[in-house]
């Protein structure tokens, strides 16, 4: 085998190319299993054959949090291990495959941060990085998370209710909806910089709820999981958790919460209106055009051979939200 | 340009094909069973087996253009083993779907094959590959005579259906499926005359 050691005069390409461009190129190369490695079989995960894997092992530092545990939000269900929660993410700002965010987000900067609560409110609020974990009493809530792709996890989140923030801002009576926006920072988010990495989404990512949904006690703003602050791949420093809706409603790395009188446009609905509705309530009876939603694979411990397929429940089992949709045709308003 | 391939070269090439098809398969399944393949081994396996099957099929379609370019008929002898591995991966892909994704919900399997266009085309592609694999022996070739070639021309249809299956299966990230479409078009372009003649013959018949 011929091993080539670079001479001093041969400058490494990474030194002359802008680092972000260089990394983008590596990411694209990596996604092309076909060209890479003349590959028959490209590795599906970073653990297999790490041909183009990251060579920087810096891991984002999370910090322990102080919080209370309400009995109401405990569960008998088996928790999904932390390792899986922080390595299996849909966060297209950092790449479209599930293992991209954990690989690409470790250098994401969350401090300083500003989250503003604005729009049709009497009392607009801005929260800085420190405020996110200090301005409201933190509690732990164990919620099921059901992804629209028919897998699910059980996650111990830490945070505070969305209602507590909205009430503090004091919405005007005209306010009917709440619009959310993820940070737009192409320098830090390769998917926003490059359409080939970000799955063709027009960033920033946007989500929305009806005001009464947002005020429901279950709607939650999370700043941590498993006792520590969130890692970037899970939406640091602050993200929404709406456990009765499909995961994509639970928008990550939020910078703006805006109260409005009109139904706000939301990212996946813009992208594929026949597949993703505004409501996106978990509903086993309404299938995605391309797959059934009747069951889900619960990701906990155990490998391939665990029988982890369970029935999906209406509103992901959170029946207490049913009143919000009384009289509505959930097939039409999917 | 002319490339001379001796039997020992073909033997070596086949050995490489066997190893590079089998080792990743064994390794990846080992990881999946021992819970080392990431949080959702089922998704990873579906992607791994699907993309590998397609890669192998495209590589098998490269054989005859390469053999022509380098005027080395001997190369054709690796085509069958590549095609068979493409079929094997596709079959395993289907079995992963049945055993680990649907976990043996047979009724759902049938309704999904009927109701979801991307599954329907995948299924038809798999049927074509199965028929080709079954009739891939010398014996079948002799028995079927001229029909054998017509039957095996279905590989082009199968490859197009798989490219369709792929692009319909993704949520929004079209880049990679589009690259596969381009690769497929290039491979079909090499055979433009042959493909034209398939259609013309059909019309005359
Ligand atoms: C009845 C037959 C088939 C079924 C039920 C089936 C099912 C599936 C499913 C469920 C996915 C994953 C979609 C997702 O979650 O992203 C998939 C993806 C895929 N399948 Fe199939 N498939 C079938 C036949 C085939 C055949 C014959 C081939 C190729 C020879 C193939 C190649 C692929 C490829 C390339 C992907 C995309 C993988 C990726 O996104 O990385 N499939 N298939």
Image (cartoon, rainbow, N blue to C red):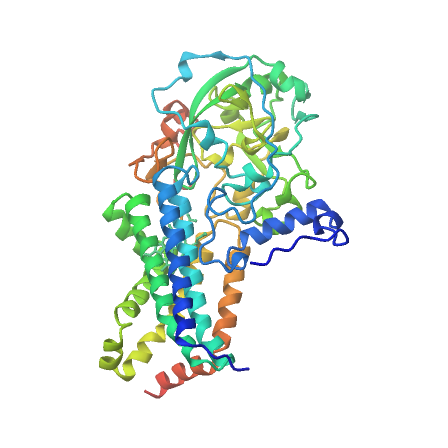
Relative to the observer, which residue lies in front, B127 or A244?
Answer: B127
Relative to the observer, which residue lies in front, B14 or B41?
Answer: B14
Residue under the image location 34 percent in, 32 percent down: A313
Percent position of residue B182, x then y: 53, 66
Whether B41 is drawn above or below B137: the answer is above
Percent position of residue A189, x then y: 64, 40
The answer to which quarter of the image holds residue B55 is: bottom left
Q: Quadrant of the C terminus of chain B?
A: bottom left
Relative to the observer, which residue lies in front, A248 or B60?
Answer: B60
Q: Is residue A214 visible?
A: yes
Q: Is residue A284 visible?
A: no
The answer to which quarter of the image holds residue A333 is: top left
Residue under the image location 54 percent in, 51 percent down: A31
Percent position of residue B157, x then y: 39, 70
Q: Ligand 1 is found in which quarter of the picture?
A: bottom left
Whether B83 is drawn above or below B3: the answer is above
Percent position of residue A295, x then y: 32, 38
Question: In the image as oriented, which residue stretches furthest toward the right?
Answer: A9
Residue under the image location 37 percent in, 42 percent down: B32
Horizontal placement of A128 versus A40: left or right?
Answer: right
């Amino acid at each position: 085998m011929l091993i080539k050691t670079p001479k001093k005069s041969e400058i490494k390409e990474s030194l002359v190319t802008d680092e972000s461009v260089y990394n983008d190129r590596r990411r694209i190369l990596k996604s092309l299993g076909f060209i890479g490695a003349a590959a028959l079989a490209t590795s599906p995960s970073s653990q297999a054959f790490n041909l183009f894997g990251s060579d920087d092992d810096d891991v984002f530092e999370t910090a322990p949090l102080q919080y209370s545990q309400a009995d109401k939000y405990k569960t008998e269900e088996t928790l999904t291990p932390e390792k899986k929660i922080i390595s299996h993410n849909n966060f297209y700002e950092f790449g479209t495959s599930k293992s991209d965010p954990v690989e690409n987000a470790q250098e994401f900067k969350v401090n300083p941060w500003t989250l503003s609560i604005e729009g049709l409110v009497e009392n607009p609020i801005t929260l800085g990085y420190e405020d996110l974990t200090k301005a409201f009493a933190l509690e732990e809530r164990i919620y099921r998370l059901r992804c629209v792709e028919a897998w699910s996890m059980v996650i111990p989140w830490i945070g505070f209710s969305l209602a507590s923030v909205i009430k503090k801002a004091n919405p005007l009576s005209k306010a009917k909806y709440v619009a959310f926006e993820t940070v737009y920072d192409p320098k830090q988010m390769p998917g926003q910089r490059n359409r080939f990495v970000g799955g063709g989404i027009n960033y920033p990512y946007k989500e929305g709820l009806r005001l009464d949904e947002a005020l429901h006690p279950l709607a939650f703003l999370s700043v941590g999981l498993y006792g520590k602050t969130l890692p970037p791949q899970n939406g640091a420093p602050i993200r929404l958790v709406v456990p009765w809706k499909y995961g994509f409603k639970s928008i990550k790395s939020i910078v703006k919460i805006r109260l409005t009188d009109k139904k706000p446009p939301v990212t996946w609905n813009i992208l594929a209106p026949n597949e993703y509705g505004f409501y996106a309530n978990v509903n086993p009876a309404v299938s995605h055009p391309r797959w059934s939603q009747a069951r889900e694979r619960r990701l906990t411990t155990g490998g391939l051979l665990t029988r982890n397929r369970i029935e999906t429940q209406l509103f992901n089992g959170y029946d207490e939200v049913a009143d919000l949709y009384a009289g509505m045709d959930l097939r039409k308003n999917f | 340009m002319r490339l001379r391939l001796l039997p020992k070269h073909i033997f070596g090439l086949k050995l490489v094909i066997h190893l590079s098809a089998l080792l990743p398969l064994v390794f990846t399944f080992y990881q999946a069973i021992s819970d080392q393949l990431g949080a959702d081994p089922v998704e990873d396996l579906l992607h791994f087996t699907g993309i590998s099957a397609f890669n192998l099929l495209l590589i098998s379609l490269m054989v005859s253009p390469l053999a022509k370019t380098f005027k080395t008929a001997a190369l054709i002898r690796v085509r069958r083993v590549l095609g068979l591995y493409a079929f094997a991966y596709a079959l395993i892909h289907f079995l992963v779907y049945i055993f680990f994704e649907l976990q043996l919900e047979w009724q759902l399997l049938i309704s999904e094959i009927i109701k979801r266009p991307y599954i329907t085309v995948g299924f038809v592609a798999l049927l074509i590959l199965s028929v080709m694999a079954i009739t891939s022996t010398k014996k079948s070739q002799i028995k079927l005579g001229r029909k054998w070639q017509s039957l095996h021309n279905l590989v082009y249809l199968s490859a197009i259906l798989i490219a369709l299956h792929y692009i319909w299966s993704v949520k929004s990230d079209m880049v990679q499926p589009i690259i596969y479409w381009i690769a497929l078009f290039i491979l079909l372009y090499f055979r433009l005359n042959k493909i034209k003649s398939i259609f013309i013959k059909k019309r005359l018949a």
